Image: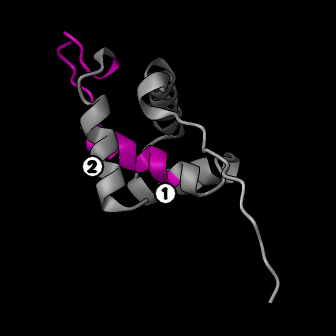
Amino acid sequence: MFVPCFERILELIQTHHIFHNNSIIGQALIHLQFMVVSYRFDHYANTISIINACNMFGIFLSVVKIFTNQYIVVILSMKFKTVKWPIIKKSCYCEN
């Protein structure tokens, strides 16, 4: 993922209530959570990618799953702001 895209997504999601709690035990920093999820999604989002993310970031399997689930909830809740279907333009191909 390109840095500007990463930063823009962080800007959009950082105020979401899922990342804020009133517990004594704080959450991992939002950008670190997003790095884990981005790494996982970039590696086909399968079981091997979870294990790779655990090894890469030194975290437990359950933590990778929690981070992933949180990001899916956030993206789905913001779908009208973040998810846009591509516009397919008709094009004409001419032979020379």
Kind of residue at disc 1: Asn
Q: Is residue 10 left or right of residue 1?
A: left
N-term-proximal mark, 1 vs 2: 2
Could you tell me which secondary element the residue under label 2 belongs to?
A: helix
In the image, residue 13 lies in the stretch drawn in magenta: no
In this rendering, does residue 96 appear at all? yes
The residue carrying mark 2 is: 7
Give above or below for 43 relative to 87: below
Q: Is residue 32 left or right of residue 61?
A: left
Kind of residue at disc 2: Glu
> Label 1 vs label 2: CA separation?
24 Å
Could you tell me which secondary element the residue under label 1 belongs to?
A: helix
Where residue 36 appears, x then y in whole percent? Answer: 43, 48
Please identify the residue farthest to the top as the structure is shown: 22
Residue 8's tag is none
| Image: magenta residue range | 18-39
| Colour convention | one colour
In this rendering, does residue 28 appear at all? no
Q: Residue at x 24, y 18 (%)?
A: 20
The residue carrying mark 1 is: 55
Q: Residue at x 52, y 23 (%)?
A: 76
Q: Which one is nearer the viewer's eye here, 95 or 11?
A: 95
In the image, residue 34 lies in the stretch drawn in magenta: yes
Please identify the residue farthest to the right as the structure is shown: 95
Q: Is residue 37 left or right of residue 93?
A: left
Where residue 14 appears, x then y in whole percent? Answer: 25, 30
Q: Which one is nearer the viewer's eye here, 94 or 54?
A: 94
- Pair 1/2: label in front: 2
Q: Residue at x 29, y 45 (%)?
A: 8
Where residue 40 appears, x then y in whole percent? Answer: 54, 50
Image quarter (top left, top right, bottom left or bottom right) of the C terminus: bottom right
